[in-house]
């Protein structure tokens, strides 16, 4: 039973355009959501997070949107850069639980 | 600050052999975690330690044991390696237990033949 789903295994975007990565969750107890970025042969690095009391959090080129009623969150990258090419993992937690990760979306930003 | 370090980076084992993966963090974090990453499977939690002296099972603990040696170090042991344990293993740490920002090491790529 996958509680965090990233339904797009990959996404291709041109440099300068917007990248939108999506994530759905099923567990109503989740109240904190995170995005991680992972380059090949490296560990994941924390990118941005959002609490369920908010519907948007912005950090530079990265914005995460949360739609609690739809149990959906998205990561927007504007403008996209070739260095953003990586695998992006969505993760969620609730209460004192540990993180539950999605399977990841590979983003390719072409010049 | 080195952050989270893991040794070794690569390892090849034969079925039935044992080995210990080492992890250390220098961020004075209380909580530490072991994950495995398999193609198309995302990151799955093997074991975690919410604080020094405690360990708990995660989603996929079978075939593994852990030791929280001190606040800095958290090791993962495979007593009798199986081909199904071929994976990339990541250690992570966080300042507080639970689902908050975790900081990951570079990973250990393990192949069991």
Image (spheres, coloured by chain):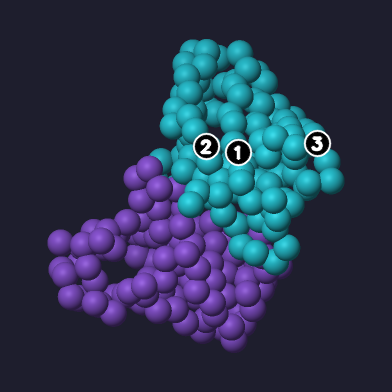
**Dot placed on the residue nearer the N-terminal end, 3 or 2:** 2
Q: Against A74, is A98 above or below?
A: below
Q: Nearer the viewer, residue B112 or A15?
A: B112
Which type of secondary structure does the marked residue at label 2 adopt?
Answer: loop
Determine which residue is flagged by label 1: A24
Q: Residues within 10 Å of mark 1 (few under 14, many from 20)?
A: many
Q: Residues within 10 Å of mark 2 (few under 14, many from 20)?
A: many
Q: Is residue A57 left or right of residue B21?
A: right
The circle drawn on residue A55 is 3
Q: Is residue A31 left or right of residue B63?
A: right
Determine which residue is flagged by label 2: A6
Chain colored cyan? A
Q: Against B109, is A73 above or below?
A: above
Which type of secondary structure does the marked residue at label 3 adopt?
Answer: loop
Q: Residues within 10 Å of mark 3 (few under 14, many from 20)?
A: few
Q: Residue at x 73, y 63 (%)?
A: A95
Select label 1 or label 3 by which is in front.
Answer: 1
Does any portion of residue B24 appear in the rendered image? no
Q: Residue at x 57, y 69 (%)?
A: B32
Q: Quadrant of residue B80?
A: bottom left
Do residues under tags 2 and 1 come within 8 Å of each other at their CB atoms? Answer: yes
Residue B104, given in percent of the width and then of the height, sits at: 54, 56
Do residues under tags 3 and 2 come within 8 Å of each other at their CB atoms? Answer: no
Q: Against B109, is A36 above or below?
A: above
Residue B40, given in percent of the width and then of the height, sits at: 38, 43
The chain carrying label 2 is: A
Which type of secondary structure does the marked residue at label 1 adopt?
Answer: strand
């Amino acid at each position: 039973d996958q509680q965090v789903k990233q339904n797009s295994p990959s996404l291709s975007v041109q440099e300068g355009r917007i990248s939108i990565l999506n994530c759905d969750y099923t567990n109503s107890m989740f109240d904190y959501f995170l995005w991680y970025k992972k380059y090949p042969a490296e560990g994941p690095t924390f990118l941005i997070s959002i609490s369920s009391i908010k519907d948007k959090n912005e950090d530079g080129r990265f914005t995460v949107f949360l739609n609690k009623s739809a149990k959906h969150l998205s990561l927007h990258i504007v403008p996209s850069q070739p260095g953003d090419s990586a695998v992006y993992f969505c993760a969620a937690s609730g209460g004192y639980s540990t993180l539950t990760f999605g399977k990841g979306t590979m983003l390719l930003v072409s010049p | 600050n080195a952050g989270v370090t893991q040794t070794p980076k690569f390892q090849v084992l034969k079925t039935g052999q044992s080995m210990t993966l080492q992890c250390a963090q220098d961020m004075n974090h209380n909580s530490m975690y072991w994950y495995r990453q398999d193609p198309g499977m995302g990151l799955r939690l093997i074991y975690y330690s919410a604080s020094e002296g405690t360990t708990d099972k995660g989603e996929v603990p079978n075939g593994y044991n852990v030791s929280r040696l001190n606040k800095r170090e958290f090791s993962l042991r495979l007593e009798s390696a199986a081909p199904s344990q071929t994976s990339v293993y990541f250690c992570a740490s966080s300042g507080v237990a639970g689902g908050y920002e975790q900081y990951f090491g570079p990973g250990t790529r393990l192949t069991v033949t």
